[in-house]
Amino acid sequence: MSRPLQAEAWYRIAGLRPRLRAHARLHRHEYRGQVWYVVEERVGGRHHRFNLQAWRVLQLMDGNRTLEEIWTLLTAEGVTDETPTQPDLIRLLGTLHTADLVEVDITPDVAELLERRGRQMRRRWFQRVGNPIALRIPVFDPDALLDRIWLACGRRGRTIVALWLAVVIPAIALLPSQWNGLTATSTDQLLAAGNLVTLALLFPLVKLLHELGHGLACKAFGVEVRETGVMLLVLYPVPYVDASGSVALANKWQRALVGAAGMLTELFIAAIAFYLWLLLEPGVVRGIAFDVAVLAGLTTLVFNANPLLRFDGYFILSDLIEVPGLAQRANRLWQYLTERYVFGVRRTEPPQATPGERRWFLGYAPLSYAYRLFIAFTIAFFVAGQFFVLGVLIALWAFVQAVVWPVVKGMKALVSAPQFADRGPRIRAVLATGAALVALLLFVLPLPYHTLSTGVLWVPERAIVRAQSNGFIRELRARPDTLLAEGDPVLEMVAPELAARVAVQRAKLEELQAQYDAAWGTSQAKAQQIGQQVGREQAALARLENEASRLTLRAGMAGRLLLDRPDDLPGRYLKQGEVVGYLRVDASTLVRLVVTQAEVDRVRLDAREVEVRFPQDTSRRWPATLARATPAAIRELPSAVLGAQGGGPVVTDPRDEKGVTAVESVFEFELSLAEEVPHELLGSKVHVRIEHSPEPVGFRLWRALRRSFLSQFRT
């Protein structure tokens, strides 16, 4: 044996007669082929897992045997690697004492009991408020109420399962055929301002049924539920129940079913709402059914089923892969690796885990930590967009809880923990190296920097065939794919109203000319007045005739004509400025793109390389050069494909039916492409990547944070 069998401090506790407290219950579990025992603390609602060797000790703790007698019984048949040593018994007794699971035959230290109780209360309080986006406030004990509800359901678990399958499975089968209608409705309804109030009222009701599903699943397997309350999810109140008692269930499928019961309940509600949406006529009730279907179906799959957050998906994953305490044990493994291989502590023992469990631990801890940070700061920025001060407080809270507090705890351990007592030089070297690396990565090491944007493939303005006046198309003067010279006619338009105005203006001018001739021989002053009127009317007639001449659309430059559905053009009414077709010209094709105010300076001053990709062929890159920049901010986009309604990145005003009015000001740029770029893709969306000079990421973060504050305070 490599472990010491005896301990120097054994004499201090050898005479104690420990026994488990009356409220502790033992449950036999099996994880990955190994037998474990879960001790349930029924008063505090906590659960502790012990291996088979610890269970042998717990079985002997009856309050009559001393620890010396217990150890004698354990070593009576010989000492093996499976035999607990005296240090093992000391650690086990300390764990049981800390968890308030053991009592001994001595007068308790009242001061120590009060201090331990205070630590437990602080730990439970921190668990409730430690997550800034999900604060828990307990309200009452729902166990008796859930018993009555389960009794009213007739305790018919199989009937409930059959009903769920009969309702949900057909809804899933119908969903693909109705997907287009659902997505079209979401665009029209979900983003409407008035619908947000409806969603806010429906969400707590849906979550109430979700938590009721957890509670009834616990009752189905005989588990007590002792706490329910309100959770402030991003400061929005939603109900919750504490179903942690299901940890004591020996069957992993039962534990997983308790964890999934809330999501299954929401899917059942979503299926019923989906049927109502199919059957009802458009109106308020059908809109509510759609909202419920989205809340109960989409949100539960996106958030509750995600195992990287401590919601239902995490507990389901932990049960199905048979790794209890996945998050805590993963953190402990990374703590051990840090102590052993970073700070060089050789006396640290690795946490007990199988090779399969260690693989889960190595991946889960960093992924979960990064995702929690991402979610916390994403929500903080979202809240800051509406309530700036509140969003900043949430962000600071998340940063302190996820970054500052672990660093403070780690520094405290490095100073006071006994395993680090002789590692002072190594610790100082590691901390100094770590700080230098962080500073190097943030503020010294230049990293690639680029701007991604979306543009629209365009041609020179003179190559666009636009209606120069309002009118109806009478005939085409040129067929598609015809090679035209500059000034060649493309089509003829007629405008009856314009023709009538020209005729009226000519008649008016003739009348004034006759009056002028008659007055010339009688009154020079009157003739002079009429002559001024004649000049004005001649100018008006010239404008009308010029407008009439523009009814013939002509090519602005030499090129091959491109028209869409030319046979449908005759008889069509065109408004002034409306695009009829394009000319495929030898000149370079253009890309018109817009960038936000945060990116405009970098694009304008430091565009080292520009490339364009087409959605039709993302594997090929087309080089481009920056040709022109709009000197002032604009609100009207060059094309609807750049707006949110056209699938682009720019948020547009929902009141604009054309979808070209941006909510925030943007800046327009023009890129020049090579002549061999396919012209048949004119008007299509393109992806633009603009390379800038490499820059450390710390300066970018500081600039983004400063810009956010300045924009909020309008300075």
Image: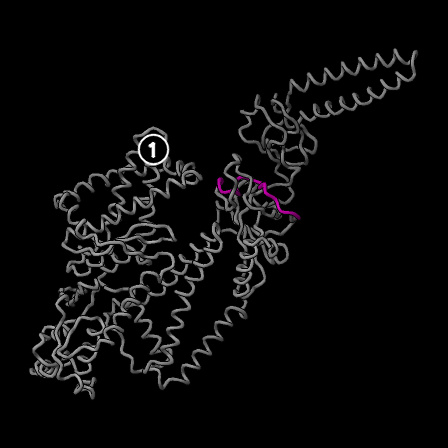
Q: Which quadrant of the view contains residue 588? A: top right
| Residue furthest out toward the front | 110
Report whether 467 appears left or right of 162.
Answer: right
Secondary structure beneath label 1: helix
Looking at the picture, tell me which residue is in the foreground, 558 or 229.
Answer: 229
Q: Is residue 645 magenta?
A: yes
Identify which residue is drawn at 76% across, 23% down.
Answer: 540
Report whether 531 appears left or right of 246.
Answer: right
Q: Position of residue 464 (x, y in %)?
A: 63, 36
Looking at the picture, tell me which residue is in the foreground, 285 or 271.
Answer: 285
Give the answer, above or below, for where 76 lies relative to 152.
below
Report whether 464 appears left or right of 532.
Answer: left
Identify which residue is drawn at 39% across, 53% down.
Answer: 234
Give the answer, above or below, for where 334 lies relative to 623.
below
State which region is magenta: 631-646
Give the answer, above or below, for where 468 lies relative to 242.
above
Report whether 365 appears left or right of 502.
Answer: left
Residue at numbered disc 1: 286
Q: Is residue 296 visible?
A: yes
Q: Position of residue 178 (x, y in %)?
A: 33, 35
Q: Which quadrant of the view contains residue 696? A: bottom right
Q: Position of residue 125 (x, y in %)?
A: 31, 63
Q: Is residue 680 visible?
A: no
